[in-house]
Every structure is written in C-alpha cells, then in structure tokens.
Image (cartoon, rainbow, N blue to C red):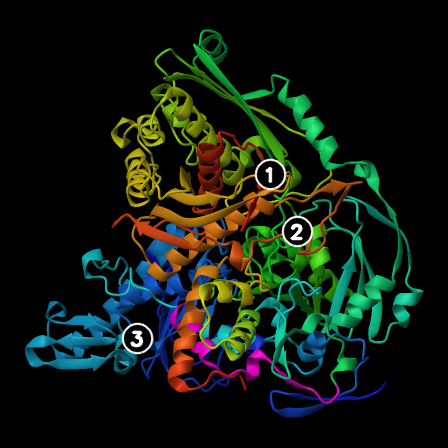
Amino acid sequence: MSAGLSRRTFLHASVTATGGLLLSFGWDDPSPLGAQPATLQPNGFVRLAADGTVTIWSKNPDMGQGVKTALPMILAEEMDADWSRVQVRDAELDRAKFGGQGSGGSGSMREEWDLYRNAGAAMRELLAGAAAETWQVPRDAVRTERGRVLHPPSAGVLDYGALVMPASRRPIPPAPIWKSPSSFTLLGTRVPGVDTGAIVHGRPLYGIDVRLPGMRFAAIAKCPVFNGRVVMVDDAAALQVPGVRQVVRIPGHENPTFLQPGVAVVADSTWAAFKGRDALRVQWEEGAFGSETSATIAAQCATLAATPGTTVRAVGDVEAALASAARVIDAHYESPFLAHATLEPHNCTADVRDGHCYITGPLQMQTSGARVVAAVTGLPVERVHVQATRLGGGFGRRLLSDCAAEAAVLSMAVGGPVQVVGTREDDLRHDYYRPAGTRRLRVGLDAAGHITAWDCHLVNISRNAYRRGDGPPWSTETYGLVAGVSAAIGPDLELDLVPWQIPHVRLRYSEPRTGVATGAWRAPAHVANGFAVETLLDEIAQVTGRSPVDLRLDLYGTTSALPAAGEDPTPYSPDRMAAVLRLAAERGGFGQRPPEGRVRGLAAHYTFGSYCAQVVELTLEAAAGTAPRRVAVHRVTCALDCGLVVNRSGLEAQAQGGIIDGLGHAFFGSITIDRGRAVEGNFDRYRLIRHREAPRAIDVHVVPSTLRPTGFGEIAVPVIAPAVANAIAAATGRRLRRTPFVREGFTLG
Amino acid sequence: MPETVLQVNGRQQTVDVDPDTPLLWVLRDTLGLVGTKFGCGGGFCGACTVHVDGVATRACTLPLGRMNGRAVVTIEGLAHPVQQAWADLDVAQCGYCQAGQLMTAAALLARTPSPTDEEIAAGMHGNLCRCGTYMRIREAVRRAATLAASQGAGVPR
C-alpha cells in the first residue's frame, strides 16, 4: 500500500483555482464550483485557502478505525496547522497524487507516516520561508505555531492564509525537515473523529446514502449453495412488482472474489428491488459442494490432522524431541467460520457512462477495487474512478470489491447509475467468511518443565487458495502462529511469526477443500492462531508450575538476540512484547489475589506491528444443570505498544472495540454450513455481543513511545478470547479449545 | 395507491407508496432522509430506530400503512443533548449504528431522566454496535443525562 514515490516526485506546487475532488458526488464540498479563491496546494494531500482554511485528504478509507482523523492529524502536526481550521476529505482514487490506496492489515499508520509528515513539513517550510521573505529576515528567525508564522524579535505574526500567494512562488523543499516528537502538540492528544458532526445529525456519509439523479436500486439473487450457477430464470412475477424495471443476469467472473453469478432485479426503490428479487423463480445448478455441512468439513479437518501434512518450517528434530520428552501435551483446537456482519449492509453505486465507470461506495481498497471493476467491465483501469465513502464497518469484508463489480456490470446493463443493496440475509449467507480450521499442537517438556519441542499442524481452509492468490495456500493462515525461530533460520523470520526460543520446532500445513467462500476477517488468522497458542502457553505454565508471565518472558527472549530485521522500519521486538506483558500483568493485578469470587486470565499477542497484552477479571456463575454458565467480565486491563500515539481517543476506542468484538465472537460467533449453504441469516441466529454483555470496564494502558507508529485496528482482537479462556480454566480447571464458547457451556452476561 | 399522510420532523408529508412498504424505506428512498439506517430488516439491530409519537420504534418493520396521522422524528430532526454528549466523548467508530443509538438514548432519557448503569444497559440492549462502542455509549448517556438536567431538556422533541 505504500506509495513508492520519493519525496521529490510527489511535491509539485500549484496555485489552483478549481475546487475539490468530490464535486461529482455532491455532499463533500460545501463551496460551489469555481467559487474558491486562490489556494496553495503543494501536493495532493493538503490545500491552504486564503481564509486560512486547510483541507487535508485522507487517502485511505475510514471504516471506524479512525484514519480519516489520524492521517490528517499527522499532516496538521507537521504543518503546525490550527486543527480547528482543518477540514478533511475522503480522497478519490488517484495514483499520481496518493500512490496505492486502501485500508487493510492495520497498515495506514505504518505505511503513510512518511507521506503525511513530508506533505505537512513541505507546507510548513513553504509558509515559514514565505513569511521570512516577506519580513526580510532569515528563515531561522521565524517559527510556526497553530496556523501562523511568528517572528518573535519584531512580534510579527502572519496568518497562514495571508501567505498563500508568496508561498506559491517558492520552490517546494525536496526534503523538508520533520519536527521533533518532543515539540508535538496535536499528536498524542484526544481528537474526536472528523465525521462526528455528520454522524450525530444523520447527514449522508455512507455508501448506502449515495443518491444520484436517475439512480436505480438493485438486489441480486445468488445461488444459496456456494459456487452454484443459474440454470433458468422465470422473472414474470418479479416484473409485475410495482417499481421493478428490469431483470439482469450476472454471469460472474472466474475469480469468485471479483464477481459471483446471480440474477439482479433493478427497481425504482430499494424495497421494490427486494420484493422483486423475492418474486424471482430461479433454478440453480448447485455444483459440487451441495452436500457439504459443518460436520463434513470438521471430519475432513480431523482426517487431515492425522496425516503428516506439508512441512512449512522445521528446526531441529521435533519427532525425536517429542519421543524423548518427559511430558507431552497434545491439544486440538477448532475454529468456525465467522461472518463479518458489517452493520452497513453490502452496497455500492456505479455509474458507467461515456466509456468511464464512476464507483462510489464502501470499499476498503480503492486501488484493487478499480482493478476488479476493470476486469469485470473490460474498461481500462485508468477509466475506473473510485470514490470510497465512509464505511459502516469493514472488518476485512470490504477488502474485496465484489459490490463495486456488481454495481458496475449492472450500470452497464441498465445504462444509468445503479446502487446495489444487499439484505442482512444476503450479507450473512453470501459473505467471504473467516475460514474454519483446526490446529493440532504437540509440545514436549523436559523434566525441569522447559519446552523442548513444539509441533503445530495447521489444518485450515485457505483464503489465499480461494482468492486464487500467488504463493502457497498456508501463506494467509500462518499469521501469528508460533513457528519457533532459532538463529539458524533468522533470515526466514516473518514479521508475523513471533520468534520463540525452542530448540525443536515444526510447522505443518494441510489444506481442507470446501466450496465455502472465504476472506480476511479482522486480524486474519491471528484470532484463531493466537487463541491456540496463548491458551496452550497458559496450560504449559499450569502443568509446569510456572507463572504464565515468566514463562512468556523466557520465550520472548530479548531484542538484541534477534537477527537483524533488514529494511523493516518497524521490526518485531521481543523487548516491546515483554514490556506490554509486564505492564498488563502489573496494572491488571495478575498474580495477585483477585477480589472474592473473581478470577483473572492473561494473554498477549503481536499483530501487524503492534503489541498487546490483556488481563481479564471475571465472575463465573455457578453451574446449574445443562444451562450455559454465565460469565460476567468485570474488567479488562489492556496494555498496548503501537509506537508513537497519534490519536489517543482513537487508540482507546479501537482497544475497547477490539476487545468487545473479540469477546462477542469468542462466545457467540459461528456460521453453520448445511447442504452447501450458510444457515444463519440474521442477528437472531448470528449473535453479536450486546450492550449488557460488554465488560463493565476496559482500562487501556499505552507504553510511551516515540517510535514510528503502527496500527491498532486489529491488535486487541486476538488477545481477549485466550485471556478469558485462561481465566475460565483457572476457575474450573477446564481448557476451552474451541469457539464459540456458548457451545462449550459458557455464555456472556 | 392510497396516500398516507404523516408528520416527519415537524412537517406534514403526503406519501403515495405501497402501504406495505416499511417506514424505513419511505424515509430513505421516498423522502430522501438517509440518516435512518438499514441494518437488518428484522428489528434485531436497532439501526433504523426513529421516534413515532415520541416512542423509539424500529422503522424497518413498521409498514407505512400504519403511519397515517402519526408523528415521526428521525435523526435529522433530533435536537437533544445526546448528540452533544456523543460528540464530546467521541463515541462513534464507524458510526453507522449511532443514529439508532442516539434515538434510543433520547427516548430512554425521556422515560428515565437519570438512569443507572443497569437501566442504561437494559435500555440500550436492543441496539447493536458492531464496532463495540458500548463503553462510550454508556458514558455518553450518563453525560447526556447531566446535560439535559442542566438544560431542562429531558424530552426529545
């Protein structure tokens, strides 16, 4: 996602007399066309108007993770802009201005940091230089502060807006100097989301709110069985529904993550499209997977788990070490399919006209979205224009741009703008699910309780295989899995593989085959892998009589013992991992006696460059017959290290939200497959965590840091389920190895 | 088609749409008030919550045919301290559910001007937030109660 542009190439000054990028969509630019005064726009990210208003573009979409506020904050900090005079826009797809665009893998902070700092620093230098020139004083004699340039000796003050013209005549600094973090005044503070006003007053903001003149609405019938095909359509009744205009067959694309086949009903309103779709009579060819069930998939996983599998990585001689171990723990973990269930249902709007396609909608990835639309429409990619709106949730679902592809092919067929909308049932039954799988972990312990061997057989459906990705099928499924690293295989260290100091380590993989559509789900693979590893470590600590904190600290080792990280600007650091673990344990009172009736559990994980540890404190209702025992989570203590904090409010929100998301899915989340189709169709069956089930308190503690920021949209999610399972084990002696917990006899409340 | 006459945000509206159509889609597609959100279509998530004659109601399952003569307030017409409280505490993440949360919270405070945490949890239980903003929602309802008490504005209009 990084732009791959040097500082020099993206800085080009221009005084623009034309307006914003978003005029075609109507709601984002408050000023009428052509009415803007002269402005200073040295790069694609920022524009200064003569009235001092600063407009900053957020290149990546905001789905709640906060980038639309945080990225502009970085620029505003470097520019010394007055935040109260900053307005923020969602950037249109524009490779020349912004490089690759998209939100995924918690990458925005990590990858856009340089771009936004450079863009802001260039602006500051232009303005400071222009002021110095105006005053005929040396550049070093002036400084910038909250939207003004100051010349202390003469008490001179110039508002940024007054410097638009002189600054526009100056050369763009090729390598502007960054501010020192010690002088930051905006970063690290609590800044409310820039869309807050629109949200609390219900102004149009999301893809589903887009309204274009002459726009039609479409709903698509898809084969209830994954990978099915349309055989025959009887659309007579559908066409009788008032408001229905047209029925269009969608052939689908060979890559099922691009476009799935179906039959669309195009109508004057969303409701008419839904009713028309319900009135269709479609005969489907169900394909090869029509008899699949959750049980057949689980049986396949169990069979594969008993095979040798493919060795992905091996250090030492695991089999020999296990054979000679004083004690072996052999544990099987299972994880179900999960749906994304973004609260804003599947939707997108497309307008194909004059050989161009204009996409407006909730896409996580504008750049790849344009490629997908080009692939299904046959248009050259440079004729696909993408305006990502605010997303009503992403969670990885909108990494795929199938909604844009559907809208585009329908707009072509209809000859005008079309908004595709899915129902909740469409969303839950035609998702690209978090892939299900099992993990078998065998751990050898010596007589002193040290881990001598670690063997992990990962049997997990591959989303990389499903998306026809390059690379082996396991490449998307091993994130966050203990693979063990010794100095001998240092260069193979993957960012997501936490290095552990175990002499004999092996990671094996087997691929279950299924028709079920799969995709990335918030903290992909980390959630299932982290659950297995972190509950197993707790179990090892218990059986060896060690503290779960000390056991982990020994396994982490130290940063200085790690092989060099090469080019990675945010290399994995065991010291940082250890620090968050210690911080969570200390603040959460882990190892101390909890209040009467309460029990604590601990877990930690490293996800996409950030470090997180949590201590949970809960109460377990007494067992009563066969009813699930109620778990009340009183407090979660969450320690984080994401480098320098950009927006404290956003960081705490993501930590709290990630914990609640992870907790809810651990207890309730599961998509059941029956006769080749997803069973759960709405929130009555696909249970999401509700207000009363959330923790009573979540305390967030951040390790102070001036290191390059890393993302925090996913890091809290994988940690909470194992922390809870470890607390339940402490209370009951029972090790939970499967989610959802509600099927293991525990519910939330 | 029979016309339905209803009041929306203080204005009388005459709507000529199939009376089976849920109020949600009349608001969004006929009247252009897209602030009320479609979440589930089954009354499970609360994203579509509006006030009908002052009562928090799910618009996605309420047919237009039952709306004759009734008064609807949507998020666009809400003027209540909950909005200030939500902004002060930066409650929203994706923000999609928040219109429904705000409508429910305003109605809750009208019934229970000074709710306990348990009353907040019970009152807000029907509104799902997929991002998990429940902690801040609880704080914001408390704050809105305080703001409303100081402004004497406990009743949504």
State the residue in front, A80 or B135: B135
10 Å crowding of disc 1: few (<14), some (14-19), many (20+): some
User: Circle 2 sits on which residue?
Assistant: A686
Chain on which label 2 sits: A
* Pointers 3 and 1 within a single chain: yes
- For the residues labelled 2 and 1, say whether their Cβ atoms are less than 8 Å apart: no
Picture quadrant of residue A208 = bottom right
Determine the residue positioned at 40% across, 86% down. Answer: B151
Chain on which label 1 sits: A
Q: Is residue A330 visible?
A: yes
User: Circle 1 sits on which residue?
Assistant: A745
Mark 3 vs mark 1: give the one in front.
1
Chain on which label 3 sits: A
Q: Which residues are magenta?
A: B68-90
Q: Position of residue A408 (x, y in %)?
A: 70, 62
Determine the residue positioned at 53% across, 74% down. Answer: B108
Determine the residue positioned at 61% across, 44% down. Answer: A519
Q: CA distance from mark 2 to mark 1?
A: 18 Å
Judged from the image, the secondary structure of the residue bearing numbered disc 3 is helix
Residue type at mark 1? Gly
User: Circle 3 sits on which residue?
Assistant: A168
Q: Is residue A562 magenta?
A: no
Judged from the image, the secondary structure of the residue bearing numbered disc 2 is loop
Q: Is residue B77 magenta?
A: yes
